[in-house]
Image (cartoon, rainbow, N blue to C red):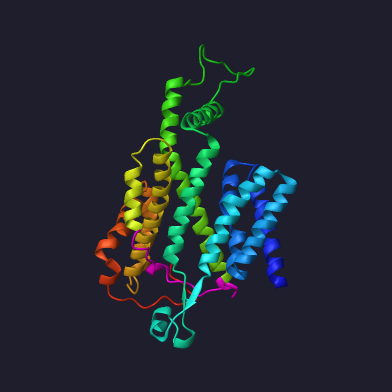
Amino acid sequence: MRTTYLAGVGLGLVAAVAFASATTGPLFARFLLMFVTPLPIALAGLGWGWRAAALAGAAGSTLILVIVSPAVALAFLLTQALPMVLLTYLALLSRPLAEGGAARAGNDDGANAVEWYPAGRLVVWSAVIAGLMAIAMLMLMGGDLEALRRALADFIKTTLENSLPTFKPTNDSVVPQGASPPQYSDAEIAALSEIALSALPAASAMSWMASLLFNLWLAGRITLASGQLGRPWPDLAAITYPVGTPLAFGAMLFATMLTGYAGLAASAFAGGLSVAYLLLGLAILHFTTRGRPWRPFALWALYLSVPLTQFVTLIVIAMLGLAETILHLRARSVAPPASPPHHPDT
């Protein structure tokens, strides 16, 4: 118990320092620190249980409250601590199975067979959480759509003014007559802000979901290597989603045509679910290529093609994930050997 307390408090303080440091410095460094902030909380949760994750969130929030402000502490609690506490709690959920379910649980001892919370459901929960966080961010930026448009327009205008080149004459330089940095009209700024507004919910949800799942996966690998992981490593290539997930995804895509916050909220959830189906498509490719001698070359070629095709490949893979609902591609393939427990196939 003492180890749990020490791990929770210590890792929570690390997360708080990373979160507070993300408010200063170069933009890339700030993004990187914000992206990995949930990692210490995930380590606490997967290694010592969800109570350690909750203690880490509380310790981190308290430190930020003392050294920064109540508003920043609340932001840390809602965007970093609570989502990871929930995900680690779900990841460690299990229930006993009867003897008939022993094989499905991967345990030869029917009396002690345990079914763990499915990894696919964790992905769907991550999509829901990311959508909610994206909506909350939009509401904080502006109480209504007009306020949100003005906030985005001000941000775009400031960014353009700071990034466009300016002419600074020196003693040895000659400035062309009439030369000045490019100027954007109010109408052009408004058009840019409208484009940003339509793309922001989905992009924000995708970013949040990527952070949650990456840190959960990395924490799992670290705790697995150290022998501290509180559950067996799941077969990620065999993940499945709840039956109603495709219907929910279709409904969110249709609802993006709505006006106002309803359409923006639907866009946020659609963005998160699109990442979920991208991951499902990758799982299908990893599953169906098991045992093939050309597998490493095919997977490397796949991942290297993503930047070369300007992410068209990712769209195709997400569509493959959607097709799994109807075609059951993994069930049609020759059954591959199970992934070794200590060398998980991701």
Is residue 75 shown above or below 198?
below
Q: Is residue 320 left or right of residue 342?
A: left
Residue situated furthest top in the rendering: 177
Q: Residue at x 70, y 71 (%)?
A: 3
Quadrant in the picture for the C terminus: bottom left
Task: Answer left or right for 101 relative to 331.
Answer: right
Classified by dominant secondary structure, the portion drawn in magenta counts as: loop
Camera-side residue of 242 and 169: 242
Please report the residue visible at 38 percent of the width from the left and 67 percent of the height from the top: 296
Residue 238 x, y percent position in the rendering: 38, 69
Can residue 242 be found in the magenta stretch? Answer: yes
Q: Position of residue 271 (x, y in %)?
A: 41, 48
Q: Quadrant of residue 170?
A: top right
- Marks counted in the figure total 0
Q: Is residue 67 left or right of residue 245?
A: right
Q: Please, is residue 240 above or below residue 205 in the view? A: below
> Which residue is at 58% across, 62% downward?
42
**Toward which corner of the image does residue 322 lie, by quadrant?**
bottom left
Q: Note whether 297 is above or below 23 in the view shown.
A: below
Q: Position of residue 144 (x, y in %)?
A: 49, 33
- Measuring from the top left, give residue 236's x and y in whole percent: 42, 68
Q: Which residues are magenta?
A: 224-244
Nearest the camera: 261 or 273? Answer: 261
Q: Is residue 118 visible?
A: yes
